[in-house]
Image: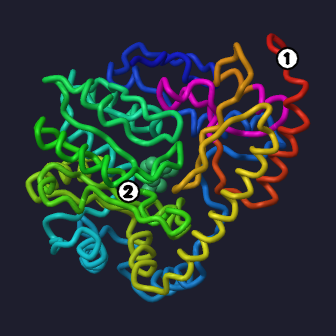
Amino acid sequence: MTLSRSALVASGKVYQTRGISRRVAQINISAIKEMPLIASKVGGCVSLGQGIPSFPTSPHIVEAVCRKMREDPDSGKYTLGPGMSELREAVAVRLGGQVGRTVDPDKEICVTVGAMEALSAAVLTVVDRGDEVILPSPNYASHIEQVLLAEGVPVFAPLHEDNWQLDVERIREVVTPRTRAIILCNPHNPTGANFAESDLRVLADLVIKNDLFIICDETYDFLVYDGQPHFSLTTVPGLSDRVIATFSFSKKYAMTGWRVGYVYAAEGILDQIMKIHDAVAICAPSLSQYAALTALEGPQDCVTEIKAALQWRRDLVCRRLTDLNEFFGYVKPQGAYYLMARYKLQGVDSMTFALRLLHEARVITIPGAAFGPTGENHIRISFGGTETEINEAFDRMERWLPGFRLGEN
Ligand SMILES: Cc1ncc(COP(=O)(O)O)c(C=O)c1O
């Protein structure tokens, strides 16, 4: 399945590409980041767009960092490249419990500038020009750009549209001798799916049989609803030298702006990832690493509170969408804090729909096409915002939708 690249440039900006490398000229800023930029010029918008949780970073984390800055004259200096030893040790303990084996903090963990740096480094490490990388469709938009940046070829395997679960047979069908890796985010942005363990185990066999890498984006590993379990491919023993797993402090501890995450991979792979990390970042920000350490070692009730609030907001968004069932269909999210709302209006592509929603109703959403071909005819809705923001956005949509006419601007 292919994707129209031009359809993804929401702002209509024409880039100057003379003298610019092919690998950069061919990528775009994802629509997730473009829509808020456009909205900042329009003014007065309310957001169901970018996945920014409304919660502030916990006071105990903020206090600890302020103390550290005041009291430790070294706190503003670089740390070791792979990250502070204490943080890597704390990560290794947590991760070891999750994957069911000992994780070596010196050989298997690198602290990164958010999961985003970890993902980019992972893709650049294993993908060569022309290599194919399988992505579910829809999928997190930045994974597409990361594959293109490595001069790889994104190959989309559609999810089941009735429940957004994995269709492993569709994945099997698109594997070729050029396939190098699969990138999988679970729980899933943008659909809110929590993929079934049985499908993930079949996928693990497929990865092993075809000698592939699997890049697991575990940004939302803590965020599943209704008491469901989350299954991580990092726990499958036969995959240990094929898994590159990326994690984030952004959403779990309401630390999106601190820019800290980490990558877990077998020593031989991590050594290579570290070369990219050194070339692009040197190390993750020192104070943010300290904040992450405080988050891991401190009380976890902030995580419990975030989860409970987001489950409540999910139910609110579902109620509001059900009230609009003349205009939208959707699958109830089981994890993360997104859903894909399928609009029932004919003859309008998702970019046009999302841009008109933004300009005319002042509501920010993300056009579904940004997430791969299967995302067309959808908008992605994030429920990371407050109850007031969510209700205001839906009130505006309720007023706007009945008057929507094709061909008007
Ligand atoms: C699926 C997914 N992966 C990675 C990221 C980036 O996370 P970080 O803030 O840790 O770079 C996000 C952020 O929204 C995300 O949704």
In the picture of the structure, the residue carrying the numbered disc 1 is 405
Residue, x 47% and y 65% (percent of image)?
Answer: 228
Say whether residue 315 is left or right of residue 213. right
Please check the rendered image and state whether residue 284 is part of the magenta-colored stretch, yes or no.
Answer: no
**Disc 2 on helix, strand or loop?**
loop
Q: Earlier in the sequence, mark 1 or mark 2?
A: 2
* Residues rendered magenta in the picture: 356-380
Q: What is the quadrant of residue 171 in the picture? A: top left
Figure check: 320 above or below 59: above
Say whether residue 391 is left or right of residue 195. right
In the picture of the structure, the residue carrying the numbered disc 2 is 218
Residue, x 32% and y 28% (percent of image)?
Answer: 170
Near mark 1 (Cα within 10 A), the count class, few <14, some 14-19 or many ≥20, is few
Residue, x 80% and y 32% (percent of image)?
Answer: 326
Q: What is the quadrant of residue 262 in the picture? A: bottom left
The x, y position of residue 40, in whole percent, is: 73, 40
Name the amino acid type tagged 2. Glu
Quadrant of image for the N terminus? top left
Figure check: 86 above or below 82: below
Figure check: 139 above or below 27: below
Cα gap from disc 1 to disc 2, whole angstroms: 40 Å
Asked if residue 81 can be seen in this view, the reply is no
Quadrant of image for the C terminus? top right
Name the amino acid type tagged 1. Arg
The x, y position of residue 159, in whole percent, is: 43, 34
The x, y position of residue 33, in whole percent, is: 58, 39
Residue, x 45% and y 78% (percent of image)?
Answer: 295
**Disc 1 on helix, strand or loop?**
loop
Give the residue furthest to the left: 268
Figure check: 124 above or below 128: below
Q: How many marks?
A: 2
